[in-house]
Structure formats: C-alpha cells, structure tokens
Image (spheres, rainbow, N blue to C red):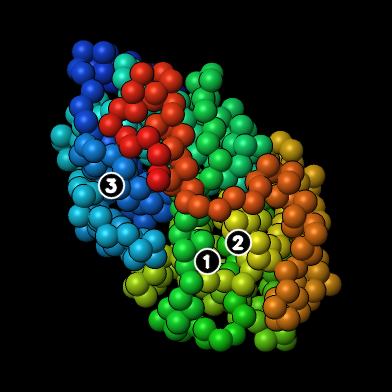
Amino acid sequence: MSRVRLTALRVRGVLARALARTAMRLVPPAPLALVAGLPDTEENSLVTALALARRFRGRIVLVAREPAAARAALARTARVLGVDHVDRVEVRAKRDPTTPWLFVRATWVAYTHGLFDSPRPVGRRVHVNLWHGTGPKWNANANQSVRIGADVLAAAGPVWGAEVVRALRQPRGTVVVPGNPRQDVVVGARDRTRLAALGLDPDRPLVLWLPTFRRSATAGRTGLSEGVPLTQDPLARRLARVAAEHGVQLVLKAHRHDDDDLGALGVRVLTEEEIAAAGTTLHELMGLADGVVSDYSSAWVDFLVTGRSVALLCPDLDRYEAERGLNRPGLREVAGELLLDEPGAHELFATVAGGEVFRATHLAEVRSRLGIGERGGSRAAALLDALARLAGERHGSSLGLAATSS
C-alpha cells in the first residue's frame, strides 16, 4: 500500500507542477511575497517573513495551518529580534481556497518543506527553499516523494547545503546562501530570566538535549523508523544523572514527530506547546543554553553560531547511516571528536559547569570543515541581500526588494 501511495503522490506532483507552471506563464507576477513554514512555529519562515516586512515594498502573506497560532509565534519571534513591523505580515490559512492563486501570482515565494508540490518558478519570480535546517542526515529516502523546484536554498553552510540540493533534486544552478534565518533568534536571545517561565533556574548552567526522532508514524509520507530508540542506550539513560552530578540542568526538547517515550530517560522533556505557553521560542531557548547535546538533527549546526559547547550522542550511528543515510562528508569525518562516550559526558558537563567550551579546538575544526566561518550581522538580512542581487542578475531589477540591509 505504501508503494502504491508513493507512486500516486509522485504522479500527482508531476501534474500539479505542470499545472502551476502553466498558470505562472499565463499570469503575470504581482508585488507579493508568500512565505510558508511547517509547523506554524518554524522559525526560518517566521524570521524570513519579518525580514521581508522590513525590506519588501509589496504585500507579505504568511501561510499557516492554524493562523492564530502562527500570529502568536510571529509575535514571539519579533520580540526576540526587537522588530516592530509584525502588522505588515498578513497571516492566511493554507486551506483557504485562494491561497494557491496567491502562490501562482507571487513574485517571491519562500517555504520550509515545500509548498503546492514546489514547482520551478516561471518568469520574473524567485522561489526560496528555507528548508528546516542543514544537518548531517540525508534528506531523501524511499519513504518520501520530494522534488523541490526552488532556485535558492538557505543553508547553515555550503558543504551540507550542496548535499540538500542534491537530495531534494533542486534545479541545476541552485544558489546556496549560507546562514539560516532562524539563527538570528539564537543570536538575539539574551534574557535568561525567561527560563524561569519554563521552571528552569536562570542562574544555573543549562544544556539542551535536541535529538532527532527514531520512530514516527507521521514523518515522511507513510511514517519512518530509523536507527535505535535512545531509550535503549545505557549512556542516554544515565545522561541526566551525569549532568546533575556536575550541577548542570539538562532539558530535552522532543522532536515533534517522535513517538518514543523520552521521559523514560529520566530527563525533563519539553514540548513545543510548553515552550509556546512560556512565551518563548525553541531557538530563543537554544540561544539561552550554555551547550547542546544532539545527533543527526540540524539543531546543533544552527547552534554553532554561538561558539558554545556542542556534543553528539549517536549510539546508533552505524545503523542510522545504513537505514537513513548521511550527507557527505559523513558525521564521523566532520565531527567525530564531538561524539560522546561516558568519560566524554562527564567531561562535557564539567566543562560547561566551569564556564568553558567543550573541546573548543575540535569545535572550531568542525566549523571549518562545514565552511561555517565567523560572521556577524543578521542571517535573514544577508539572505535578502543575496536575493536582491540574484534578482538583479537574472531579471534586471530587485523585484521590489530593497537592494541592501543598510
């Protein structure tokens, strides 16, 4: 049944893309920017919409499954960034029957997981794949039917960014722009008193555990099962106790697709709903953390911008690589020095407790291998700068986008 469904989805995608491209040939583009994120709290999309509100002279529409939740998330993001032009962003339901028409008419389209089968733009239009991070995992597998037609990719860095372009079969000549917009939230987070709303002590060191899911009935097109559940790993089950021994708060943010009971690890587990109820965002929480433990997730690559501690707990690395696949170069080659065993876990939490950076020399080498250099300023602004230049080169004008962030 899964194979039949995937075949049907591929056929539908081919037909939908052809229809959309025909419509774009017949309908001239309008001064409109359409942005979509999945879920509605996806901060790459929210930050991009806010950046467009500052720079784009036309109408800006944010597509959401639940518009009220998206408006609230947009306001929380704007608070962290210190921006005051939220009202320029119109939020519209994706299921609204007029939304596909907006997609066809829009000069600028930016999305995180594809939108309306992601056809290639036609005419004086630019489409941007914001994706949802640029981590170690390969972004295509037999249980998905994905072809992204955007001609630009925002990526944490160029090395794994090129792998995302390949995995998603983006067009030849796709421009990879380094820097994820949501990293602006990580950098902008400074008020540690906000941790109190989550029941955390602002005065104690904090490490955020951000594992990807291993089992999910909702991921992909028909569910996914990859690697080995963390609840089966002895070190994962002891990690909270090791952190406590060193006086460090360890909090796990569960992936929204995760079907495993991660509370069995003996660690405090935060959900997206709890984070939103506390008036904050995931990437603000990341920006307030002293370190991150992760694995195949893209979260730790975003966190590299802070220069703070990163450690990787990947007890199922061989199996995950065989079942899901990893980008090239592989995780061992890029960040093998950050992989944790039990002595390394004690080293990590002792280092964080002492206000130092875990394996700082190796961390710098990881950044170098991924092509992620030291760069100040806004990632979202740099993305729009690159888009304005690209529009000028391809279409002879910036298509209504202010040419620079200055």
Residue that appears at 65% across and 46% down:
372
Task: For marks 1 and 3, give the one nearer the viewer.
Answer: 3
Viewer-side residue, 318 vs 335: 335
Estimate the x, y position of residue 362 in percent, counting from the top left: 79, 57
Residue 297's tag is none
Residue that appears at 74% across and 44% down:
369
Viewer-side residue, 365 vs 248: 365
Residue type highlighted by circle 2: Thr
How far apart marks 2 and 1 lie (CA) works out to 8 Å
Viewer-side residue, 168 vs 405: 405
Could you tell me which secondary element the residue under label 1 belongs to? helix
Confirm or deny contact between disc 2 and disc 3 (CB under 8 A).
no
Quarter where residue 36 is shown: top left
Estimate the x, y position of residue 115 in percent, counting from the top left: 35, 34
Q: Which residue is mark 2?
A: 306
Residue that appears at 43% across and 78% down:
194
